Amino acid sequence: MTLRFLDTNILLYSISRDPTEATKRDRAVALIDAGGNALSVQVLQEFYVQATRATRRDALPHDIAAGLIETWLRFKVQETSVAIMTGALEIKAQHGLSYWDAAIVAAARALGCPELYSEDLTHGREIDRVTIINPFR
C-alpha cells in the first residue's frame, strides 16, 4: 500500500469548528478516514501544541487532543531521529525550506511516501521523490 504523508494543518483542519473552514474540514476528515496515511512524531507534537493553545478560539482540552493523537497512532508514524534531523538539514540547505518543513519532508521520505499533503508548501513541487499536494486547492 502506498502511504500518503499528512502535515499538521490537515489534522488541525479536521477539528476546526470555524464555519469558514467547513470545506477544508470535510476534506481533511475524508483524507484521514481514507486510511493509508503516515505521520511523524513532529506532526503529532505540532498538532497537540496548536490544538490546545489557550489563544485558539476552539481549543481542545488535553484529554480530547491526546485521545485524537492516540487514534492517529494507527497510522505509520516516523519517529524523530538523528537520521531525520540530518536529512532535514540537507533538505533545508538544498531546497531553502524552513528546518521544520524540511523535517516533515525528511520524515515523509524516510517512510517512502511519494506524496506529502500540506497547505503550507508549494503544490506540485517535488523534493527528494516526495511530491507536495495541497488538497485544498
Image (spheres, grey):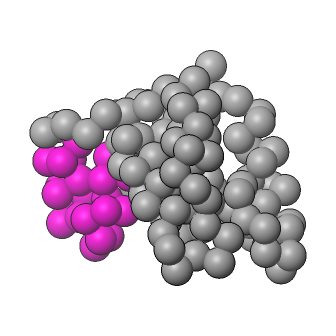
Which residue corresponds to the image point at 79% horizontal and 74% vertical from the top-left? 18
Residue 121 horizontal/vertical position (percent): 50, 68
Q: Quadrant of residue 97?
A: bottom left
Q: Is residue 76 visible?
A: yes
Residue 107 horizontal/vertical position (percent): 36, 42
Residue 66 horizontal/vertical position (percent): 52, 42
Q: Quadrant of residue 40?
A: top left
Residue 62 horizontal/vertical position (percent): 52, 51
Q: Is residue 9 left or right of residue 86?
A: right
Q: Is residue 94 left or right of residue 5?
A: left
Q: Residue furthest top?
A: 1
Q: Quadrant of residue 95?
A: bottom left
- Disc count in the image? 0
Which residue corresponds to the image point at 61% horizontal and 40% vertical from the top-left? 68
Q: Nearer the viewer, residue 90 or 69?
A: 69
Q: Nearer the viewer, residue 55 or 93?
A: 55
Dominant secondary structure (helix, strand or loop) of the stretch shown in magenta: helix
Q: Is residue 1 left or right of residue 81?
A: right
Q: Which residues are magenta?
A: 84-106
